[in-house]
Image (cartoon, rainbow, N blue to C red):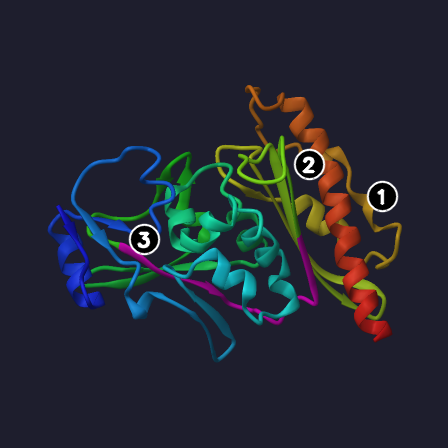
C-alpha cells in the first residue's frame, strides 16, 4: 500500500493504523524495504526552516539541499557542511533530515553536527507530541526511541545563536557517494580571544555518534589561536568504540578522529578571525 495524505492529521492517522513513513526514500528504496508506506514528503507542516523565540526549527521533511542553501547562523555552518557531503546532489535534493536521523546509521552525517548543537527532536502521534534530546532519540545502530504510530516532525536547535563558529569534516574513500570512515563536528563560542564554550561530537566511531565532554572541558578557556588544536589528544576519544571493517581499522579511525577534530577547530578559528577582521 502507498498513501500520500494531504495533511498531517491524515498522515498520523495512517501511521496509527500501521503504516510506515516515507520522505525522500534514499535509504528505504536501496534497501528494498516493503510494507505500507505513508508519503510525507509533500506535507507543508513538515517542511521548511523557521525561527520561533530562541529556537531554530527544521521540519523533518526538509531536504539537505534546502538546508545547505538556507540563511543560517554561524553555529549551524557544520550542519550545512554536512548537508553538502551527504551522497551526491541528487541525494541531497531528495533526502531529508528526518530520514537521516530515523535511519539511525552510525555513519549518518547529519548526527554529529546536530549533537554538537544540543539538538532535540519533536515526535508526533495522533494523540501526543513530545520532545527528546537527539542523544536520547538515537539508541543504537538502526535503533531509535520512536514509538508505534509516532513520526519525527521536526528537529529543534535550542540555541541557534550560542556559537559564532562551527565546522564538520568527514573522511571517506572518495569525495561523494561514500559511507564515512569517521567524521567530526565542533561548535565554538569565542569571546575576548578565548574559547568561552565548545561542543564536539564524533560519528562512525561507535554504535552511535558521541559527544566528547572531556575534550569540551579541555578546550574551554583556552586561547582562540593556532595552539588550540594542540589540546586535542587521543585521551579525549578514549570512550569511543570504533570497529574494524573493510573501510578502516579501529586504530585508524581513532587517529583520524583526532586529526579531523584539529582541522575542524582550525576552520572555526579561521571563520572567527575573518569576521573580526571584516
The percent coordinates of residue 59 (x first, y second) are 39, 64
Q: In this view, does 112 lie above or below 177?
A: below
**How many numbered marks appear?**
3
User: Which residue extends farthest bottom?
Assistant: 53
Label located before the other in sequence (3 or 2) = 3
In the depicted view, which residue is nearer to us: 265 or 27? Answer: 27
What residue is rendered at 18% in x and 39% in y? 35
Label located before the other in sequence (1 or 3) = 3
Q: Do the residues labelled 3 and 2 touch (CB within 8 Å)?
A: no
The percent coordinates of residue 166 (x first, y second) are 67, 58
What residue is rendered at 44% in x and 38% in y? 105
Q: What range of the chain is rendered magenta?
A: 151-167
Dot 2 lies on which element?
helix
Q: Mark 2 points at which residue?
A: 257
In the depicted view, which residue is nearer to us: 110 or 26? Answer: 26
The percent coordinates of residue 150 (x first, y second) are 24, 54
Label located before the other in sequence (2 or 1) = 1
Dot 3 lies on which element?
loop
Quarter of the figure that contains the C terminus = bottom right
Q: Mark 1 points at which residue?
A: 230
Figure quadrant of residue 223: bottom right
Q: In this view, does 215 lie to the left or right of 105?
A: right
Figure quadrant of residue 29: top left
- Mark 3 and mark 2: Cα distance apart in space: 32 Å
The percent coordinates of residue 152 (x first, y second) are 33, 56
- Mark 2 and mark 1: Cα distance apart in space: 14 Å
In the depicted view, which residue is nearer to us: 69 or 274? Answer: 69
Q: Mark 3 points at which residue?
A: 23
Amino acid at each position: 500500500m502507498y498513501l500520500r495524505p494531504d495533511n498531517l492529521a491524515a498522515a498520523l492517522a495512517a501511521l496509527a493504523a500501521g503504516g510506515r513513513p516515507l520522505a525522500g526514500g534514499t535509504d528505504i528504496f536501496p534497501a528494498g524495504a516493503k510494507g505500507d508506506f505513508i508519503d510525507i514528503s509533500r506535507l507543508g507542516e513538515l517542511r521548511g526552516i523557521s525561527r520561533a523565540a530562541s529556537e531554530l526549527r527544521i521540519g523533518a521533511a526538509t531536504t539537505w539541499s534546502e538546508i545547505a542553501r538556507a540563511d543560517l547562523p554561524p553555529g549551524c555552518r557544520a550542519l550545512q557542511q554536512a548537508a553538502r557531503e551527504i551522497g551526491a546532489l541528487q541525494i541531497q535534493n531528495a533526502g531529508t533530515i528526518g530520514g537521516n536521523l530515523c535511519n539511525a546509521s552510525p555513519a549518518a552525517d547529519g548526527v554529529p553536527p546536530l549533537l554538537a548543537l544540543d539538538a532535540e527532536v519533536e515526535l508526533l502521534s495522533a494523540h501526543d507530541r513530545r520532545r527528546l534530546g537527539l542523544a536520547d532519540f538515537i539508541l543504537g545502530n538502526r535503533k531509535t526511541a520512536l514509538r508505534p504510530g509516532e513520526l519525527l516532525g521536526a528537529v529543534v536547535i535550542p540555541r541557534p545563536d550560542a556559537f559564532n563558529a562551527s565546522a564538520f569534516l568527514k573522511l571517506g574513500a572518495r569525495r561523494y557517494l561514500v559511507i564515512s570512515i569517521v567524521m567530526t563536528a565542533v561548535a565554538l563560542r569565542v569571546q575576548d580571544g578565548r574559547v568561552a564554550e565548545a561542543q564536539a561530537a564524533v560519528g562512525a566511531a561507535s554504535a552511535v555518534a558521541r559527544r566528547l565532554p572531556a575534550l569540551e572541558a579541555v578546550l574551554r578557556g583556552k586561547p582562540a589561536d593556532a595552539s588550540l588544536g594542540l589540546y586535542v589528544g587521543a585521551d579525549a576519544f578514549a570512550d569511543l568504540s570504533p570497529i574494524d571493517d573493510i573501510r578502516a581499522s579501529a586504530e585508524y579511525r581513532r587517529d583520524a578522529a583526532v586529526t579531523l577534530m584539529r582541522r575542524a577547530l582550525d576552520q572555526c578559528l579561521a571563520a572567527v578571525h575573518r569576521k573580526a577582521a571584516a
